[in-house]
Image (tube, grey):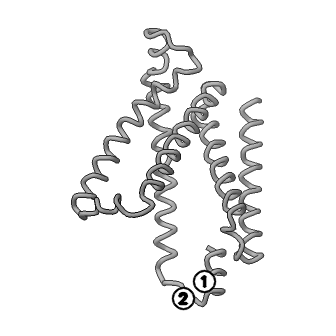
């Protein structure tokens, strides 16, 4: 918020009242709902024993068994997301957006992001399996913190923070330092 306030002042833009509260509410909801995928993974693996069934009944290697859980989660999420997207495309008559210049590149980048997302969750599942019983809690905390660290690092690398003031940078570095400390504490606590 401090970065955006500084950028708006530099560009002479007025800050909309109520926009910050709406943004904070959306961020809180996103944080709450983002754990849904991890809860599904925990229930499918630890309670439903899908990964154990994958190993014992179908002979899959133990380190690969998490994919059986992720596959079911992504099929469910994919069905609802694709159905809603198609419904919205018909309702808004926005199919023509796929024929504009650059849409092929955007679709290609979307596919790359989807594959990268699946890959990162696969490695999170693998790491959670290695951690053991606490994998879905300890691993998820490290996974989420790592995502925030990498996302902000890429923001600095791409110039997203170039117009941010010193105070905004100080706050983000402080927050990222707390996340790094949290990762260390959680990791050491899990070892003990």
Residue at screen point 55% across, 21% down: 64
Q: x and y percent of residue 141 in the render?
A: 63, 43
Q: Nearer the viewer, residue 78 or 124?
A: 78
Q: CA distance from mark 2 to mark 1?
A: 7 Å
Ranked by sequence position, the earlier of labels 2 and 1 is: 1
Q: x and y percent of residue 87 in the render?
A: 24, 54
Q: x and y percent of residue 149 in the render?
A: 69, 53
Residue where numbered disc 1 is placed = 8
Side (left or right) of 176 relative to 69? right
Q: Nearer the viewer, residue 4 or 138?
A: 4
Residue where numbered disc 2 is placed = 14
Q: Secondary structure at mark 2?
A: loop
Q: Secondary structure at mark 1?
A: helix
Q: Quadrant of residue 165?
A: bottom right
CB-based contact (under 8 Å), mark 2 and mark 1? yes
Side (left or right) of 56 relative to 162? left
Badge number at residue 32:
none
């Amino acid at each position: 918020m401090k970065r955006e306030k500084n950028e708006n002042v530099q560009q002479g833009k007025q800050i909309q009242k109520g926009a910050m509260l709406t943004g904070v509410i959306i961020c809180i909801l996103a944080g709450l709902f983002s754990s849904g995928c991890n809860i599904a993974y925990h229930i499918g693996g630890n309670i439903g024993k899908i990964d154990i069934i994958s190993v014992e009944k179908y002979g899959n290697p133990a380190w690969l068994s998490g994919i059986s859980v992720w596959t079911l989660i992504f099929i469910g999420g994919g069905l609802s997301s694709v159905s809603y997207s198609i419904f919205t495309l018909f309702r808004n008559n926005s199919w023509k957006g796929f024929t504009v210049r650059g849409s092929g590149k955007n679709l290609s980048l979307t596919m790359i992001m989807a594959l990268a997302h699946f890959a990162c969750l696969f490695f999170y599942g693998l790491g959670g399996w290695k951690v053991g019983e606490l994998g879905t809690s300890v691993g998820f905390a490290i996974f989420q913190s790592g995502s925030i660290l990498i996302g902000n690092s890429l923001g600095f690398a791409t110039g997203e923070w170039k117009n941010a003031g010193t105070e905004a940078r100080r706050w983000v570095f402080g927050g990222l330092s707390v996340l790094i400390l949290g990762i260390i504490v959680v990791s050491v606590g899990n070892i003990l």
